[in-house]
Image: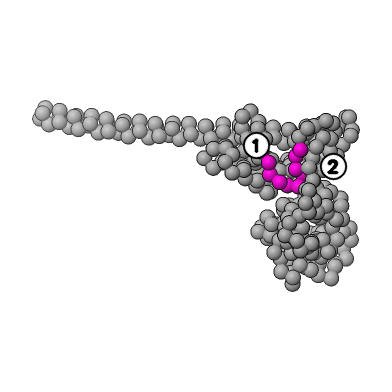
Amino acid sequence: MRRGQQGMALIIVLWLIVLLSVMAAGHSKNVHTDTQLASRQVQVAQARGLAEAGINHVILEMLADNSTHEIPIDGTAFPIDVYDTQVTLAVRKTNGLVDLNAAGPDLLDALLAACGVEDGRRPELIDAILDWRDGDDLTHLNGIEDKDYLAAGLPWTSRDDSFKAIDELKYLPGIDQGLFERMAPLVTVHSGSAGIDLENAPPILVMALTGEPVKPANSSQLRGRQLGTFHIYASVAAGAGTVASIEAVVSTSRSAGKPVTIHEWREPPRQVLPPLAGVGG
């Protein structure tokens, strides 16, 4: 009897050892996972800080009277070093983008053509944009006004005022997420211009407007003090395929009290700018 009890006790002890070993292995795995997650969060935070530093670098270059650095303002990606890390930046002056509040039907048509919208659909989308931004309740020929939104069962109506952000395009019937993502890099609400400067425009817009596959030679460069409004993108690789990206829209002026105005600051940006090849780990 005693020998049987001793055998049972031995089995129980062995099972306890196995159970404790499994628990210890699970705890060790959890600790390892938590450590990896914490390390990843630190990497992303560092990358975000470097991206912010890159944007601040560009802004300082804009405000410098005697800068010796040339920075493209036509959206061309370029690298800078920040604390021994390369930050990928792209700057585009808003006069190279289509302003949703100022562009006329012809420019909006070219925009939609550049985004791959077929001829038959473009008049409806153009008039929907015009109806959204105008201050009346009169419907354009192919447009949509308050009563049409209500009839469609939508929980919103036309703004009947200027676009406050390009994200409002998603409220327009016919503009799905895919089309919005194609339009977003080509539009702005900050230039106030009815036309665009082809030297600063994305090549796809230049092609739609001129039929030429490339933009004019001698694209704009930023050297020294620059006044105006700019879309600035910054990306930094945080390792293992992670990218920290920021999009800012800023205006510079001669005002000593407020030389810089930040209109937008988005993390992540609508248009994700990948780091240049070979940058980061």
**Quarter-wise, where is residue 87 in the image?**
top right
How packed mark 2 is, by other alpha carbons closer than 10 Å (few <14, some 14-19, many 20 or more), is some
Please state which of residues 122 and 144 is positioned toward the viewer in this rendering: 122
Residue at image position (54%, 42%) is 241
Reply above or below: 57 against 165: above
Measured as percent of width and height from the top left, residue 157 is found at 79, 59
Task: Determine if the magenta segment contains residue 248.
Answer: no
Reply above or below: 276 against 68: below
Measured as percent of width and height from the top left, residue 252 is found at 84, 37
Instruction: Say which quadrant the C terminus sits in.
Output: top right
Instruction: Say which quadrant the N terminus sits in.
Output: top left
Q: CA distance from mark 2 to mark 1?
A: 23 Å
> Which is nearer the N-term, disc 2 or disc 1?
1
Q: Amino acid at mark 2?
A: Gly
Residue at image position (44%, 31%) is 31
Q: What residue span does the magenta drawing correspond to?
A: 70-79
Helix, strand or loop at mark 1: strand
Helix, strand or loop at mark 2: strand
Q: Amino acid at mark 1?
A: Val
Q: Main secondary structure of the magenta part?
A: loop
Please indicate whether residue 229 sits to the left or right of residue 184 in the image: right
Residue at image position (83%, 52%) is 197
The outermost residue toward the bottom is 120
Measured as percent of width and height from the top left, residue 220 is found at 79, 45
Residue at image position (69%, 57%) is 182
Please state which of residues 45 and 27 is positioned toward the viewer in this rendering: 45
Residue located beneath label 1 in the image:
87
Residue located beneath label 2 in the image:
228
